[in-house]
Amino acid sequence: MTISLRFISAEDDNFIREVKIDGEATFLDLHHFIQQLLDFDPSQMASFFMTDEDWQKNEEITLIDMVMDEGNNSLIMSEIPLNQFILNVKQRMIYTFDLFNDRNLFIEVHGIENSSCATPQCIRENGPAPEQLDMSMLLESAMGEPSTDQKYDFDDEDYGFDDDDLDDPMITYTDDLDDY
C-alpha cells in the first residue's frame, strides 16, 4: 500500500509538502525522508504524535526510547511501520521537529492506494520549509562562549593588597592551614 501525506506548517501558510511513501516503511524512514526533504539537521530529536481530528495528541512515536520505566512501553520510530497506525484517509498526526520549542508540522493522510512505492517521493512542494533551529548556536548563546583572548593579571594590586599590608598589626598571618 502507498500512503500519500500532506504536510503543512502553522509558521507559514504557503508551506505545503505532499509525499508518497510505502505503508511498510517505518516512522523512522519517514523521519529520515522529512529530514532530507526539508534539509534539517538529522542529529536533532523529533517525535510523531498520532492525533484526533482536532489535532489533540494521542500516542507518541519517538526517535529513541527515553522511558526509564521498564513497565512502560515506548513506541519507537524504527520499530513501527506506518501501516500499523495509518489506516484511513483524513487521519492526522503531528511531526514535532523542535521538541524544546514545540515546533511542528501537521500531517494529514491525503490518500491510500493499493500500489507499492519503492522509495519515498515528494510529489508537491510549495513555500519555504520552516527553519530548524541550530541547537549548537542556542547553547553557545545561552552558556556564553568563553573568550580565548582573555588575559588574567594576578598582580597583588588587583586584590587590594600592597606590600604595606604585610606590616599591618591588624592582619594576622599564619602558616597553619587548620586556622582557615
Image (cartoon, rainbow, N blue to C red):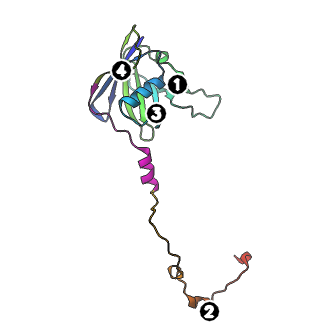
The kind of residue on which mark 3 rests is Ala
| Mark 3 element type | loop
| Mark 4 element type | strand
Label 4 and label 1: CA atoms lie apart by 19 Å
Label 1 and label 2: CA atoms lie apart by 74 Å
Q: Position of residue 10 (x, y in %)?
A: 32, 33
* Mark 4 closeness class: few <14, some 14–19, many ≥20 residues within 10 Å: some
| Mark 1 element type | helix
Q: Position of residue 6 (x, y in %)?
A: 34, 22
Residue occupying the point 42% across, 22% down: 52
| Sooner in the amino-acid sequence: mark 1 or mark 3 | 3
Residue occupying the point 40% across, 43% down: 134
Q: Position of residue 170 (x, y in %)?
A: 63, 89
Residue occupying the point 39% across, 20% down: 120
| Residue at image mark 1 | 78
- Identify the image quadrant of the C terminus: bottom right
